[in-house]
């Protein structure tokens, strides 16, 4: 079976089928109604003529007498029977005369003459309860049949013309209505996954198709955001894993370069294990951040978060010969974020401070306005004027970072994004000397 796949064609066929059924029903109903009306009109005419003829007939001495001779009887197909005797008859075919004679007795009734187009009607002449004779009148059905044939042909022609007009109107309407859909389909096929900012831009929704375009634009916005998030997640994962993977590889290569003692091997394996654990923690943290909106955020001790973050950058601090200092609050503070996620938010900021600081990096923990503030200070060159927001953009580096060696410039961007995903933030504040970054996380 052939299936029509085009929606427009299917809709057009449905419309044509519905209109065709309606026209067939209407045409049949009209012609049946006209036939019934013609039948009623013919019968009414015969009754009227019979009553007229009856009105000029009198009964005298048991015999029927015509009040006056009927000059039209011959042409009007009127028979008057006095009992079985014909006292008036028209010029008619033998079949008509025989049919009229058969109506001379019996009740009043209609009778069609054989296969001809003539119909007869009998009306008994009754007086004082006694039947004296019968009036039979006839008429030709040809005019009525001609009217019915003309009406049938006209109604069929009208139905065909109306069906053609309906097809043309439906085709035009469907083409006009579905043209925006065809345009959107062509646009969507022309776009590639690189065209993340392309939209249908049909304006404010005012009908079903514009609402469809508006809904698809919003869907494309979410898809584009998801793709950008995926790319950013990949870049951040690469950035975060680069250093521990490099350390793990370097330690393994160094351990295999020459034979060592058991203790040296154990030390190398311990370093490799520490880096592997850090990689696993980074992956888990980034995955937790990616699914942050789908699950609970958890809580953690702010002091433990600070210590874990300092431990994560201890190797970098040793390499840069930077002293790490922690200033904890006098009372316990809890942050409304899981400890691993909070540590990963702090890690890029502390790592950045260790790389740019000259001798000392300090971390202070405090509470203010329903947030836990982790303030990181270093004695490095600080943030140049006008770069307070630019350094948080992916792949962007401040003036101070141009001389610090190769870097992807994703650390601070990752830190701010993770912080904002849990209703926090990462900002830089001006100081008299060095750099200051404030990590704001919600308090538990």
Image: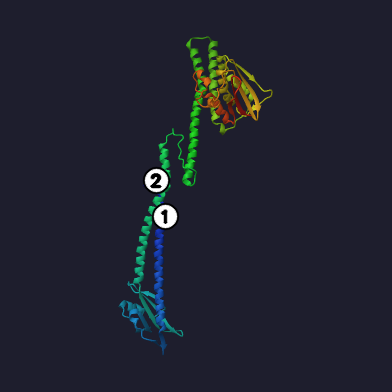
Q: What residue sits 57% from the left and 24% below the top?
A: 344
Q: Residues within 10 Å of mark 1 (few under 14, many from 20)?
A: few
Classify residue 292 as left or right of residue 87: right
Give the image quarter of residue 441: top right
Asked which secondary structure carries label 1, the reply is: helix
Which residue corresponds to mark 1?
Answer: 18
Which residue corresponds to mark 2?
Answer: 6
Classify residue 82 as left or right of residue 295: left
Q: Residues within 10 Å of mark 2 (few under 14, many from 20)?
A: few
Classify residue 133 as left or right of residue 276: left
Q: Is residue 405 positioned above or below 60 on the image?
A: above
Asked which secondary structure carries label 2, the reply is: loop
- Is 420 in front, or is 1? 420
Q: Earlier in the sequence, mark 2 or mark 1?
A: 2
- Is 327 in front, or is 56? 327
Q: Give the residue furthest to the bottom.
A: 61
């Amino acid at each position: 079976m052939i299936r029509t796949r085009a929606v427009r064609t299917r809709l057009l066929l449905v419309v044509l089928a519905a209109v065709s059924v309606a026209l067939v029903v209407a045409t049949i109903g009209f012609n049946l109604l006209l036939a019934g009306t013609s039948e009623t009109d013919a019968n009414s005419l015969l009754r009227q003529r019979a009553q007229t003829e009856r009105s000029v007939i009198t009964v005298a001495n048991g015999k029927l007498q015509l009040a006056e001779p009927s000059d039209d009887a011959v042409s009007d197909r009127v028979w008057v029977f006095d009992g079985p005797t014909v006292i008036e008859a028209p010029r008619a075919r033998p079949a008509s005369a025989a049919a009229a004679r058969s109506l001379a007795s019996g009740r009043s009734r209609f009778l069609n003459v054989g296969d001809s187009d003539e119909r007869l009607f009998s009306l008994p002449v009754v007086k004082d309860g006694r039947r004296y004779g019968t009036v039979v009148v006839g008429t030709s059905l040809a005019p009525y049949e001609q009217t019915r044939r003309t009406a049938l042909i006209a109604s069929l022609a009208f139905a065909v013309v109306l069906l053609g007009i309906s097809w043309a109107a439906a085709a035009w309407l469907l083409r006009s209505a579905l043209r925006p859909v065809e345009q959107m389909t062509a646009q969507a096929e022309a776009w590639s996954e690189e065209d993340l900012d392309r939209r249908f831009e049909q304006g404010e929704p005012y009908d079903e198709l514009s609402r469809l375009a508006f809904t698809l634009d919003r869907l494309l916005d979410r898809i584009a955001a998801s793709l950008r998030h995926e790319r950013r997640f990949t870049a951040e994962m690469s950035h975060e894993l680069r250093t521990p993977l490099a350390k793990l590889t370097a330690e393994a290569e160094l351990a295999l370069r020459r034979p060592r003692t058991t203790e040296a091997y154990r030390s190398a394996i311990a370093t490799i294990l520490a880096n592997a654990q850090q990689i696993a923690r980074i992956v888990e943290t980034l995955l937790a951040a990616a699914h942050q909106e789908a699950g609970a955020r958890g809580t953690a001790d702010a002091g433990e978060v600070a210590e874990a973050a300092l431990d994560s950058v201890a190797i970098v601090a040793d390499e840069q010969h930077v002293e790490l200092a922690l200033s904890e609050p006098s009372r316990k503070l809890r942050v409304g974020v899981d400890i691993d996620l909070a540590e990963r938010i702090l890690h890029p900021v502390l790592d950045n401070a260790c790389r740019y600081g000259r001798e000392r990096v300090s971390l202070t923990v405090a509470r203010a306005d329903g947030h836990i503030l982790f303030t990181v200070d270093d004695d490095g060159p600080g943030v140049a004027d006008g770069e307070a927001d630019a350094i948080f953009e992916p792949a962007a580096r401040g003036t101070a970072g141009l001389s610090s060696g190769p870097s992807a410039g994703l650390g601070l961007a990752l830190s701010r994004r993770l912080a904002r995903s849990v209703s926090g933030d990462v900002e830089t504040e001006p100081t008299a000397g060095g750099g200051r970054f404030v990590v704001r996380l919600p308090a538990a």
